[in-house]
Image (spheres, rainbow, N blue to C red):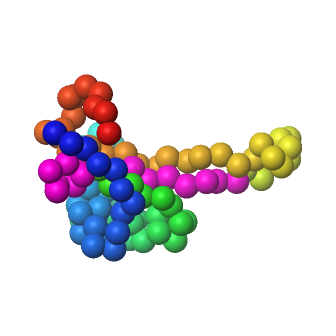
């Protein structure tokens, strides 16, 4: 099975909303502070977009099988020099259940 990683496109919006809702429901099952995934997934994706997050989609056999989202953040902590205040922030990672635990794959 070939696995390709590509930038998310506008056509991926409904897929990403579904993935985000699934993550939210899994977290909601663990902790009562989480709102229903169907309620928060679309606004959350919009927030990621507003933050200019990089969103990558994993595709196998023309089927989206996961995604990762992250961005470069800047810490305003005065105890660090300015050149060390930038760091990568990964906010979300999702893989569909039937593709989990398959070991490493070469891309």
Foreground: 28 or 80?
Answer: 80
* Residue at the bottom extreme of this rendering: 10
- Residue at 47%, 49% (x, y): give it: 91
Is residue 24 something one can see in this rendering? no
Which span of residues is magenta-colored? 59-74
Q: Is residue 37 above or below residue 95?
A: below
Residue at the top extreme, as displayed: 103
Instruction: Report which quarter residue 98 is drawn in.
Output: top left
- Which residue is painted at 27% across and 73% down in the image? 11
The structure residue drawn at horizontal position 56% and vertical position 47%, both measured from the top left corner, is 89
Query: Where is residue 48 drawn, in percent x and y?
Result: 47, 64
Is residue 90 rendered magenta in the image?
Answer: no
Is residue 35 something one can see in this rendering? yes
How far across and how far down the image is residue 60, in percent?
A: 19, 48
Labels in figure, total: 0
Name the quadrant containing residue 71: bottom right
Q: Which quadrant of the view contains residue 104? A: top left
Dominant secondary structure (helix, strand or loop) of the stretch shown in magenta: strand
The quarter of the rendered structure image containing the C terminus is top left
Q: Position of residue 47 (x, y in %)?
A: 47, 68
Give percent across and percent down for residue 56.
39, 55
Work out which quarter of the rendered image holds the N terminus and state it.
Answer: top left
Answer left or right for 86 relative to 3. Answer: right
Which of the pair 64/44 is nearer the observer?
A: 64
Residue 69 in magenta? yes
């Amino acid at each position: 099975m070939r696995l390709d990683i590509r930038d998310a496109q506008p056509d991926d919006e409904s897929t990403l909303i579904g993935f985000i809702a699934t993550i939210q429901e899994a977290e909601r099952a663990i902790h009562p502070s989480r709102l229903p995934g169907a309620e928060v997934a679309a606004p959350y994706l919009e927030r990621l977009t507003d933050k200019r997050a990089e969103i990558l989609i994993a595709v196998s056999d023309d089927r989206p099988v996961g995604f990762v989202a992250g961005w470069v953040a800047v810490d305003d902590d005065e105890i660090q020099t300015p050149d060390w205040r930038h760091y990568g922030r990964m906010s979300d990672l999702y893989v569909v259940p039937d593709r989990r635990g398959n070991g490493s794959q070469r891309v």
